[in-house]
Image: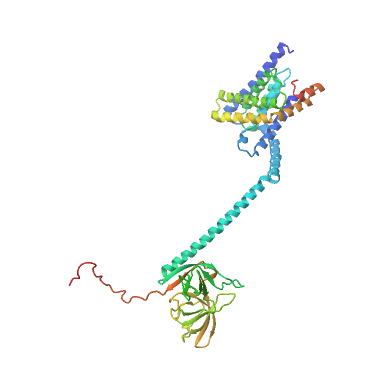
Amino acid sequence: MLTLRRRLIDWSLTGLLVLIPALVLRSSLSRGTPSGFDQALLRITAPLEAGVSWVVEGLGGLWSGYVALVSVERENTELRAENETLRKQLATMTRRAYDVAALEDLATVKKRTPADTLGARVIGAPLSPQFRVLRIRIDRGEREIQYNMPVITSAGAVGTIGTVYGDYADVKLISDPGSKIDVVVSRTGNRGTLVGLGRPDSYACKIDALEHQTAPEAKAQLGDEIVTSGKNGPFPPGIAIGKIGKLSGDNGLFQEVEVDPAVDVSRAGAVMVLLAPPPPPDPDGKIKKKSDPAFGGKPQ
Amino acid sequence: MRTATLILVAYFLCVVLAAIWRLVPLGIARHAIPDIGALTAAYLGLTSRKNLAPAVGGAVVIGYLVDVISGGPVGLSALALGLTGLVARTIQQRILVRGATMTMGFSGFIAIVAAIIGFMIRGLYRMPNASMATELKHVVLCAIATALIGPLVWRAFRRVDAAFARTHRERDAALEGLTP
C-alpha cells in the first residue's frame, strides 16, 4: 500500500499534469500560432509522417490500380453495352438527319420549279464492280409516274424514268449510254446532245456534236456549265447538267467534250420527278385587267 | 519505459491511420475516425499500477502529439485525454476489459467519454462548436470506428506490456488482458 505521503505526491503530480495542458491550451488559444516547441516537434515528426503516407499511398495505389479491378470489369461491360446503344442511336439519328437533308433538298427544288413535281425517296442503287451507281430505284410507281419523266435534284438533272413496275420505278441516269438529252452551253449558247458514256468507274457523259462558233471566245471551254435546252426531250430548259471536264476533239464544225454531271447520284437520298412541263407564259400577264363585278349590273 | 513505448506505438498508429483514412472510399467513413488517443489514454489509465501520474502523463503526451499532428489547438486533446485517463483509472477496479465484445464496447464507451470531455473543454474555453446534430453524428461515428478498431489496438498494447513483463506470470496476465 502506498503511504499517504506518496499518494499525496502522486495526486499532486497528476493534478499538475492535468493543469499543464490546460495552461498550454489557454496560451495556445491566445497566441493563435504554434509555439517554437510545437514547430520543432513537427519538424522531427514530419519525415515519419511523410514516409508512412508515401508507403500507405503507394500500397493504396497498387491495390486500386492493379488488384481491386473487379468492379472495373463490370463497369467496362456496362460501358460497352451503353456504347453499343449509343452507336445504334447515333446511326438512327444520322439516317434521320440524312432523310431530313434530302427532304429539305426536295422542298428547295419544289419551290423553284414551276412544273408539277412529285417527290420520291431513293430506295435502291445497284452498283458496278467499281462502286459506281448504275441506276437508282425510287418508291413511286405506275399510279403516279410514267416512262421518260425527268428526274432532278436541287443540284441538277439525275436522269429520266426508265422502267416502272408496281409501286417502284428505275431511273435511267444521264450517264447511262441509252440517255440522250438536248443541252446547251450556258455561257455561249452552243447546242448539242448529251449522251452517257456508261463507264464503270465514272459518271462522265459526252457531247459529240457541240455547235461550233468561229470566234475563239465562243468555243466551249473547260468548266463551262451545261444546262438543258428544253428542246427535243422531256426536260424543261435551264436545268443544270454539269460542267465540261474534258475537251476531246474539234473537227472544225463541231466540238467534242466530256461533261462531269452536277449531281452525285451515289449520295442522292430523295429526288423530284417532273410530272408535267411548266405552263406556257401568259402573254397578257403584264396587262392590268379590271375584274367584272360579282353582283349587280355593269355600268354603261 | 513501458509508458514511453506505448506512447510511441500509439503515435505510430495515429500516423498510419491518418494516412490510411484519406484513402477510405466510403464518404461517411471519412468522418468516422477512430480515436486512438482515447484508446491509449484509457489503456494507460486502466493498466496503471500503483501510481496514477505516469498514466495521466502518458495520456497528456499522446494528446499533445495528437494535437500537433491534427493541427488543432495545442493542449485540447492533451487535456481531454488526460481527463479520459483519469476516468479510466476511476473505473479500473470495477470492470475487466477482456474478450473482443467487451473490448469493443469499452472502446466505444471511452471514445464517447473523450468526445464529451472534449466538448466540455471547448465550451469552457469558449471555442466554436458545430451544431448539436453534427457533433452527435461525429461522436457516434467516431465511437463506432473506435469500437471496431479497439481490439486490434489493445492487442498491440498488450504485446508491449508483455514485452515489458518481469515474470512469466505477468506476461501471461498482460496477454490475457488482466490488469496487473
Relative depth, front residue between A290 and A1: A290
Instruction: Please state, as top left, top right, bottom left or bottom right, where the N terminus of chain A lies in the image.
Output: top right
Question: Could you tell me residue A6's position as x and y percent?
Answer: 72, 14
Q: Position of residue A21 (x, y in %)?
A: 63, 24
Seen in the picture, residue B136 relative to A168 is either above or below; the reply is above
Q: Nearer the viewer, residue B50 or B135?
A: B135
Residue B108's x, y, as percent?
Answer: 65, 27
Q: Quadrant of residue A9?
A: top right
Color theme of the render: rainbow
In this picture, residue B130 sits left or right of residue A190: right
In the foreground, A18 or A174? A174
Q: Residue furthest bottom?
A: A252
Residue lying farthest to the top in this orientation: A4
Q: Is residue A136 visible?
A: yes
Above or below A222: residue B121: above
Q: Residue at left 45%, top 69%? A: A118
